[in-house]
């Protein structure tokens, strides 16, 4: 099995690549250079919101580095192509796909791929979306379950890679185990780890010739855009609940409606 991963450059993306590499599935890799991992707060917001913004993203940086470590690709034996966003749908990527002729393509953490690139991909072409589709599609979709007091709906989706944003048929939903003391970024990191474990099992099934059932997305859910999220939304997470939402959920003080998950195994 030849597997191509297209992924971003943040710690969670490189962890995913490392997991596939260590399992022996990764045979070629494309890395898109993503935005700064520790962004600066907007200048036109309340000073208190700037402090929350810095707290949120500094906590994310610290938690991801603790969870995923510093991953160096220099000693890997797979070919790697580095691209920027403007090159993602360009000739170098299309030539790379043709050269390495993958049986499986996985995308995780890259910008939208156009139809010209998608046409080059094999039958097994899936995207890893950092949210539970169809209810949380689009951007910042591991944040919104916490904002809506539903931390048990924070998870990830493996779905068919199509031109429709996070809208392809669902292969599998992954949700992490929630532990006392988990903050929003702990849950996000654990979701990445659980999804990587689950994907390895799905790839094992494919390698054994087992069939994978794809479930169409029948519910429109919600497509969150980058414009939906504002720094003042962080007031709910940190000022109102002090990043303690998981503990409140585990104590039975929040609702307990489970998401109707699609499972590949």
Image (tube, grey):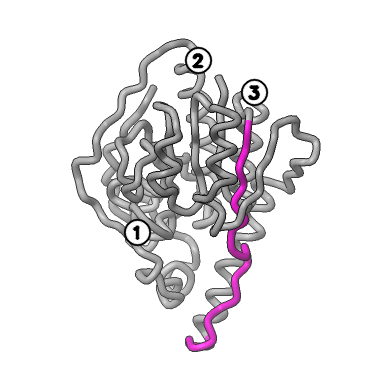
Q: Is residue 248 visible?
A: yes
Q: Which circle's residue, 1 or 3, is located before the other in the chain?
A: 3
Q: Which residue is mark 2?
A: 207
Q: Which circle's residue, 3 or 2, is located before the other in the chain?
A: 3
Q: Classify mark 2: helix, strand or loop.
A: helix
Q: CA distance from mark 1 to mark 3?
A: 39 Å
Q: Residues within 10 Å of mark 1 (few under 14, many from 20)?
A: some
Does the magenta segment cover residue 29? yes
Q: Nearer the viewer, mark 2 or mark 1?
A: 2
Span of residues in magenta: 28-47
Residue 17, given in percent of the width and then of the height, sits at 62, 38
Q: Write the residue at 45% across / 42% down.
A: 117
The answer to whether the residue labelled 2 contacts the one labelled 1, judged by CB atoms less than 8 Å apart, is no
Q: Does 194 appear above or below 150?
A: above
Q: Does 231 appear above or below 168?
A: below
Q: Which residue is mark 1?
A: 149
């Amino acid at each position: 099995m030849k597997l191509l991963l297209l992924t971003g450059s943040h710690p969670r993306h490189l962890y995913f690549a490392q997991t596939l590499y260590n399992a022996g599935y990764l045979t070629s890799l494309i890395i898109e250079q993503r935005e700064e991992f520790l962004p600066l707060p907007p200048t036109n917001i309340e000073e208190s919101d700037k402090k929350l913004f810095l707290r949120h993203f500094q906590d994310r940086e610290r938690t991801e580095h603790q969870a995923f470590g510093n991953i160096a690709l220099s000693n890997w034996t797979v070919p790697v192509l580095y691209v920027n966003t403007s090159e993602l749908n360009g000739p170098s990527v299309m030539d790379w796909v043709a050269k390495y002729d993958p049986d499986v393509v996985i995308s995780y953490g890259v910008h939208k791929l156009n139809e010209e690139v998608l046409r080059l991909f094999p039958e097994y072409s899936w995207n890893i979306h950092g949210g539970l589709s169809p209810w949380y599609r689009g951007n910042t979709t591991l944040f919104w379950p916490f904002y809506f007091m539903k931390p048990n709906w924070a998870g990830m989706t493996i779905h068919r890679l199509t031109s429709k944003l996070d809208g392809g048929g669902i292969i599998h939903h992954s949700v992490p185990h929630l532990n006392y003391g988990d903050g929003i970024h702990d849950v996000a990191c654990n979701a990445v780890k659980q999804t990587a474990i689950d994907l390895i099992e799905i790839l094992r099934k494919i390698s054994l010739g087992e069939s994978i059932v794809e479930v169409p997305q029948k519910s429109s859910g919600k497509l969150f855009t980058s414009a939906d999220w504002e720094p003042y939304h962080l007031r709910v997470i940190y000022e109102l609940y002090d990043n303690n939402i998981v503990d409140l959920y585990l104590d039975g003080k929040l609702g307990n409606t489970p998401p109707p998950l699609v499972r590949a195994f």
